[in-house]
Image: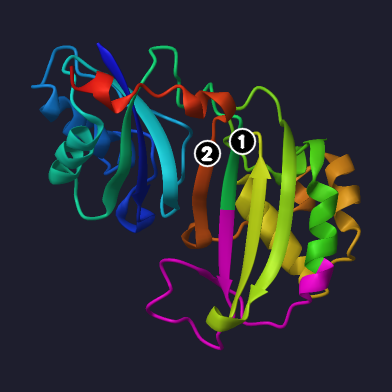
Amino acid sequence: MYRYKITFAYDGTNFSGFQIQPNKRTVEQTLKNAVNKIAKNPEPPLSVIGSGRTDAGVHALNQVAHFDCPYKLGNDSMRKALNSLLPLDIIVKKAELVSPDFHARFNAHSKHYRYRVDQSDFVNPFKRNYTAHFKYPVDVAKMQKAAQDLVGEHDFTSFVASGSQALSNVRTIYQADVHRDEANNEIVFDFVGNGFLYNQVRIMVAFLLEIGSNQRPVDDVIRVLAAKDRNQARMTAPASGLYLVSVDYGDQNNKTIDESESIK
């Protein structure tokens, strides 16, 4: 078996999230169908292991997964083969033959998520599936200041939705930034961390928007983190504005196999 790492993008609008679910269209199942067709439908079917799950409606710019294949193809041949079988709302940007110990989920060092909020007076029909909408004035400087209280290792129990299956709610955020995109009339939130809990980014964004619109004091993050109570951060921003920007693997990024070896 030969292990491939794929980096791919998808429009999450018409998917019920990444993870396979009965009778629902998911990213994982769509990729799995393509991989198994390339592998000539072996039994048992091959699995596709993603770097993590995304919810229904969430998008990805550079999601990562791996799979094992009984046939050895060149990197670009694998990329083209997959794209020829995938629907138009998923595209494989890169396929790489990697060492057998590479694992898309367990080897990930950090993930970068971005959230976009449109500030038009009314919902833009061409952006409604790709941004959230919040028309009220916000103080970006306040949100940027408050976001820094999220940086570091914390117990994020107050910022995780019910239904989470995580054994621990402790996570580390390395970077949290908020800025205004004047050209697109959007507020953009960026978070980089070692992992994120169920709906965590969407809850943090909703919380920061409350601070930016003067519904909460700028230092309220500290109090709510200490409370470890989901009722203290009530709102969840919609899925449409969330993007998985990238997954970083540190030294594992260098463990790809040379292209000349992949076609021997």
Q: Is residue 91 magenta?
A: no
Give the CA separation, mark 2 to mark 1: 6 Å
Q: Which residue is mark 2?
A: 247
Label 1: how many Cα within 10 Å (few below 14, some 14–19, many 20+): some
Look at the image and give the residue range highlighted in magenta.
Answer: 114-142
Residue 46, horizontal then vertical, whole percent: 23, 19
Figure quadrant of the N terminus: top left
Taking 223 as reference, is 190 left or right? left
Res. 237 image quadrant? bottom right
Residue 89, horizontal then vertical, whole percent: 27, 54
Q: Is there a contact, CB below 8 Å, between mark 2 and mark 1? A: yes
Is residue 47 or residue 62 the one in the foreground? 62
Which residue is at 89% across, 41% downward? 226
Q: Is residue 140 magenta?
A: yes
SS at mark 2 in the image: strand
Label 2: how many Cα within 10 Å (few below 14, some 14–19, many 20+): many
Q: Measured along the vertical axis of the image, is residue 25 above or below residue 68?
A: below
Q: In the orientation shown, which residue stands out farthest toward the bottom?
A: 121
Give the amino acid at mark 2. Answer: Val
Which residue is at 48% across, 81% downward? 123
Inspect this view and state whether residue 134 appears. Answer: yes
Q: Which residue is mark 1?
A: 110
Res. 99 image quadrant? top left
Which residue is at 50% across, 48% downward? 244
Q: Measured along the vertical axis of the image, is residue 58 above or below residue 4?
A: below
The numbered mark at residue 158 is none
Q: Measured along the vertical axis of the image, is residue 145 above or below residue 10?
A: below
Q: Measured along the vertical axis of the image, is residue 149 above or below residue 95?
A: below
SS at mark 1 in the image: strand
Q: Which numbered disc, 2 or 1, marks the residue that appears first in the sequence?
A: 1
